[in-house]
């Protein structure tokens, strides 16, 4: 086993190992993200071909750790009833694995271009739905319920909408109006 790759998911370190093109995930890191307190019990539920052991170097010296392959990772995530599982699964399946397959590595630096409205970083309903792992209608409802119109979010249409789409490149949607949420307001509300 070689090539330790470190990633970050919502402030949690996720360590993986690339073994000849196959990615193995540190089970203890996956369990921490999913708020599963006993990785050894999780490991017991996995098939033998979904898990393994490897030796890694830590500040305390060499340690044997349990690792899981992609199939094992899916088994852990899909078995979890914890609310943390769905957004984590979405991050893994929509961001990390496609980039690993496409480029052979996962970069901690976001390549996503920030959308702006008069210099203020904003998110669309589609952006928020993707980040939260929910449907767009649900995201729209939560915006209207939890955020303040005119301060935290804006409804734009007509010329303003055309200008926003022009300034921000390809923005999906063919609606007559769009909701723009200030990114800082979303982050503050989302991280409560």
Image: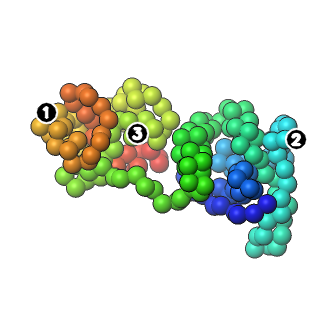
Q: Alpha-carbon distance for marks 3 and 1?
A: 22 Å
Kindly identify which residue carries mark 1. 158
Q: Earlier in the sequence, mark 2 or mark 1?
A: 2
Residue beneath the point at 26% across and 51% down: 116
Q: Earlier in the sequence, mark 3 or mark 2?
A: 2
Q: Which residue is mark 3?
A: 128
Q: Where is the N terminus found, in terms of image quarters?
A: bottom right
Return the residue nearer the eye: 99 or 173.
99
Q: Is residue 28 above or below residue 55?
A: above
Residue visible at 17% across and 38% down in the picture: 162
User: Could one spot residue 12 in this view of the protein?
Assistant: no
**In this view of the protein, which residue sits in the foreground, 11 or 114?**
114
Q: For this rendering, which residue is in front, 139 or 64?
A: 64
Q: Quadrant of residue 142?
A: top left
Which numbered marker is on residue 48? 2
Image side of residue 57 versus residue 183, left or right: right
Give the CA distance from mark 3 to mark 2.
38 Å
């Amino acid at each position: 086993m070689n090539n330790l790759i470190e990633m970050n998911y919502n402030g949690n370190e996720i360590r993986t190992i690339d073994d000849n093109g196959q990615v193995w995930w540190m089970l203890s890191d996956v369990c921490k993200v999913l708020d599963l307190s006993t990785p050894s019990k999780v490991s017991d539920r996995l098939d033998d071909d979904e898990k393994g052991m490897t030796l890694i170097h830590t500040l305390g010296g060499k340690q044997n750790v349990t690792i899981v392959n992609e199939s094992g990772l899916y088994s852990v995530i899909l078995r979890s009833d914890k609310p943390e599982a769905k957004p984590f699964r979405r991050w893994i399946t929509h961001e990390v694995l496609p980039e690993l397959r496409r480029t052979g590595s996962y970069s901690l630096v976001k390549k996503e271009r920030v959308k702006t409205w008069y210099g203020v970083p904003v998110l669309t309903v589609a952006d928020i739905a993707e980040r939260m792992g929910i449907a767009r209608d649900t995201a729209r409802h939560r915006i209207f319920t939890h955020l303040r119109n005119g301060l935290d979010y804006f409804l734009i249409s007509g010329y303003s909408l055309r200008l926003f789409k022009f300034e921000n490149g390809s923005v999906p949607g063919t609606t007559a109006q769009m909701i723009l949420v200030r990114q800082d307001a979303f982050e503050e509300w989302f991280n409560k």
